[in-house]
Image (tube, helix red, strand yellow):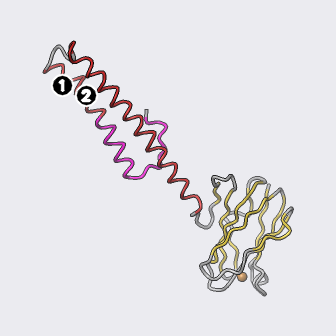
């Protein structure tokens, strides 16, 4: 029954599920094992209706809790999609994939020199260096997409549509490309 619940539940959500599930289990055990010994005719004629109502109510409540908690955790997962650390390629709700690029003195670090498939990409750049850097992306169908100059710690995003081919990423601050701030990205 719990098979469709995502594994990424928070501790609070797990506790909530545990309480609801536990209540159901206790109720089931009570009605199956304990009540019949104390009350041999259980549920009997008078008790049958409330028993069925309670069973259905608990079951529906549990299903609702599961669905609700699962939805909540999906939303949480969605909220985290823009917080990618350097090296991650993620897919946002808009369908654009995110490539997180880190710039240091004097390198451009990509999750991978290759990426799978032509698509819309959000290139998220973070200046992790001690100097000002920027990022200029160019290649097929992208004549030149550039961020403003980024102070240390600053971030920027470039929305680009990448097709098959080779793209160049570089920092255009004078001298930085020559010092090593140039990378390639192959789209296959
Ligand atoms: Cu630079």
Q: Nearer the viewer, residue 145 or 87?
A: 145
Q: Nearer the viewer, residue 116 or 160?
A: 160
* Numbered circle sitting on residue 34: 1
Residue 3 position in % (x across, y down): 47, 36
Disc 2 C-beta below 8 A from ligand 1? no
Question: For this view, does 60 lie left or right of residue 123?
Answer: left
Highlighted magenta segment, given as a residue range: 2-23
Quadrant in the picture for the C terminus: bottom right
Q: Count the numbered circles shown.
A: 2
Q: Nearer the viewer, residue 38 or 148?
A: 148
Quadrant in the picture for the N terminus: top left
* C-alpha separation, residue under disc 2 versus residue under disc 1: 7 Å
Q: Quadrant of ligand 1?
A: bottom right
Which image quarter: residue 42? top left
Which image quarter: residue 153? bottom right
Question: For this view, does 148 lie left or right of residue 127?
Answer: right
* Numbered circle sitting on residue 86: none
What residue is at 50 percent from the left and 54 percent from the top? Answer: 76
Relative to 81, is 72 above or below? Answer: above
Question: For this view, does 56 lie left or right of residue 163?
Answer: left
Circle 1 SS class = helix
Within the magenta stretch, is there residue 14?
Answer: yes
What residue is at 49 percent from the left and 45 percent from the top? Answer: 71
Question: Looking at the image, do the residues carrying marks 2 and 1 touch, with CB atoms under 8 Å apart?
Answer: yes
What residue is at 36 percent from the left and 30 percent from the top? Answer: 59
What residue is at 37 percent from the left and 52 percent from the top? Answer: 12
Residue 57 position in % (x across, y down): 34, 29
Residue 170 position in % (x across, y down): 77, 75
Relative to 120, is 4 above or below? Answer: above
* Numbered circle sitting on residue 29: 2
């Amino acid at each position: 029954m719990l098979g469709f619940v995502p594994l990424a539940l928070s501790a609070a959500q797990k506790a909530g599920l545990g309480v609801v599930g536990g209540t159901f289990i206790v109720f089931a055990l009570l009605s199956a094992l304990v009540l019949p010994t104390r009350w041999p005719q259980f549920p009997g004629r008078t008790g049958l209706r409330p028993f069925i109502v309670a069973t259905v109510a608990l079951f529906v409540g549990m299903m609702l809790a599961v669905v609700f908690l699962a939805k909540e955790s999906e939303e949480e997962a969605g909220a985290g999609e823009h917080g990618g650390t350097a090296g991650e390629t993620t897919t946002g709700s808009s369908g654009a994939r995110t490539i997180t690029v880190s710039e240091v003195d004097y390198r451009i670090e990509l999750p991978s020199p290759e990426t799978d498939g032509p698509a819309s990409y959000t290139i998220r750049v973070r200046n992790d260096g001690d100097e000002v850097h920027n990022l200029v992306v160019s290649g097929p169908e992208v004549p030149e997409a550039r961020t403003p100059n980024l102070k240390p710690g600053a971030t920027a995003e470039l929305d680009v549509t990448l097709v098959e081919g080779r793209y160049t990423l570089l920092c255009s601050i004078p001298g930085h490309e020559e010092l090593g701030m140039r990378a390639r990205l192959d789209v296959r």
